[in-house]
Amino acid sequence: MLNRMEKELLNSYFYTYRNTLGMETKTAKQAAKMNVIVSKDTAIKEGVYSLPSDYWKVIFEMEKNNSNNLWVKYYTRARNDGVNDDDIIYFWETYSVERYMMQETQNIININAMLTALNRGKTMDEASAIVRKKFPTYGNPSIKSDFGTEDDNFLPLELVFRVNKNIITNLKNFQYEIEKHSSFNAFIRSMARTNMLGKL
């Protein structure tokens, strides 16, 4: 069962999928519903679904005390990737299901780009390279990428808000810089670590 906020998310993303991603109405409805359910399930499995929106205060306190737990280990890595206090606060104050909806939506965009490349005659390796270069991928940054270095690993999801606001909306301005990096993720890490990713 979906609560009120999740139903609102479903409706909002339905319009995004239909109007922005160009999906047919039926497909957009199905994709939005599936992704809300998957995102809710992920939030529950990750143990964050019922945590309060100000849980970032607890995380900051654990970091301050150098607690030996998974939260501190994760955020140590995330901060090395350029995640800052504002990213963490904004992330936690965003409804848990919506955080994962953003990740699932990026997955849809990446899959569609992959299929488009394959339909144009590219090999699987060529299509994968195109997606890596042109789109971000989010997930656990500790999971080793099949390609390149650690900078090519999944981006921490906490960066999605700044990436969408400051990079995706102005993508043409960054094409030259992106080409200098092994992947879109490596470019984002470079920008975040040097405080050039912009503000929320």
Image (spheres, grey):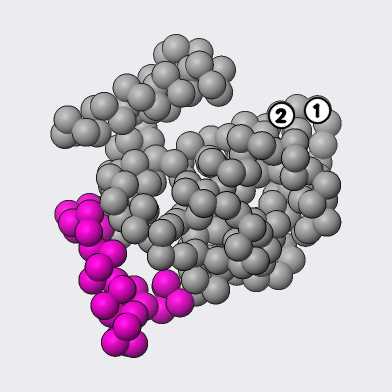
Q: Which residue is mark 1?
A: 120
- C-alpha distance separating marks 1 and 2: 6 Å
Q: Which quadrant does the N terminus fall into?
A: top left
**What amino acid type should be assigned to the residue bearing mark 2?**
Thr
Crowdedness of circle 1 by 10 Å Cα count: few (<14), some, many (20+)? Answer: few
Q: Quadrant of residue 10?
A: top left
Q: Secondary structure at mark 2?
A: helix
Q: How far across and how far down the image is residue 5, in percent?
A: 21, 33
Residue found 49% across the figure and 71% down from its top: 79
Is residue 181 visible in the rendered structure shown here?
Answer: yes
Residue numbers of the magenta segment? 47-76
Q: Please check the rendered image and state whether residue 77 is part of the magenta-colored stretch, yes or no.
A: no
Answer above or below: position of 8 versus 166: above
Answer above or below: position of 155 versus 114: below
Q: How far across and how far down the image is residue 158, in percent?
A: 45, 56
For the residues labelled 1 and 2, say whether their Cβ atoms are less than 8 Å apart. Answer: yes
Q: Which residue is mark 2?
A: 116
